[in-house]
Amino acid sequence: MKKIIIACGAAVMMAGGLVSCNGGGSSAAANSFEDSLSQSIGEMSGSQLNMQYTQLPEEMRAKFNKKEMLEGIKTVILTDTARQSYLTGMQIASQLWGQLYIWEQSGIKIDRKAIYAAYEKAFLADSVADMSEVASRNNLLMSRVNKIVMEEQQRKAEAEAQAKANSPEAKKNAKAGEDYINEQMKNDPSIKRTESGLAYKVVSEGTGEKAGANSRVTVKYSGKLINGKEFDANDNATFPVRGVIPGFGEGLQLMNKGAHYILYIPGNLGYGVDGTPDGSIGPNDTLVFDVEVKDIK
């Protein structure tokens, strides 16, 4: 959002430059162009910001009040472009504000008045402080800050993942997938299962060395959900083994050139509790892949 605000302000300044370069007595045609340009810049920037606003998660969107945002935008846009120092200060402060916000969200208490007082004193000093000493002292504190921020981000990520895993849909899909694999193994004793939980059936073995973690493979495959709905297929796909979901990558490393397997991939080895963005694969959905390895490099 900050980038859009700054870009918008810069665009208006550029538009203002066009007006001033024309000198006095602009023609009606020029005015029409400049009026259209001003209208278009505002409409485009406002629409982009509105699109980003609507795409924010509901809990984050609640923290941003449109009227307050417009107050800030208005302050920048309507500031006299001759006040470059003022605008520069606002841009610097906006960047610092964003950093302070991240720290505060991580539980670090920030004294903004103390920050400004120290900022003002250092900037207005008659001589520049010993930067090596200032940087050394700051780096020690920043190391601790970064550790706190990373730990908090990890805690939030784990809590979010746990919440998703405990959702009714994720639990339902995980159980349905496990029941499906167990039923397949009961009806077909040739289906084996690895320690990770991946189940596979050897339709036919190939020849030569098996694919490795660093291999690049060319395969023919089709992927289906346990209800039989196909979500993906390709007769000649080439990709690195490390570049696919964990269960698919593990299955490929069991195979050599010419091998044909059926892979039964539990949700935790597939797209996990997130599923796919388009919704074609739900949280913890079990996947069934029919895979033939055509080449290994």
Image: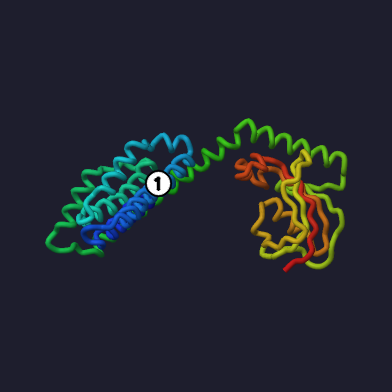
Q: Nearer the viewer, residue 237 or 123?
A: 237
**From the viewer's perspective, is 190 left or right of 106?**
right
Give the residue drawn at x 81%, y 68%. Answer: 208
**Mark 1 Cα shell of 10 Å, populated few (<14), some (14-19), many (≥20):** few
**x%, y% of residue 213?**
68, 61
Quadrant into which the C terminus falls:
bottom right
Give the residue drawn at x 43%, y 37%. Answer: 61
Q: Nearer the viewer, residue 99 or 6?
A: 6
**From the viewer's perspective, is 37 left or right of 114?**
right
Q: Amino acid at mark 1?
A: Glu
The vertical placement of 105 against 262, above or below, is above
Q: Nearer the viewer, residue 266 or 197?
A: 266
Residue topped by disc 1: 43
**x%, y% of residue 97?**
31, 47
Q: Residue furthest front?
A: 28
**From the viewer's perspective, is 11 left or right of 151?**
left
Give the residue drawn at x 87%, y 44%. Answer: 189
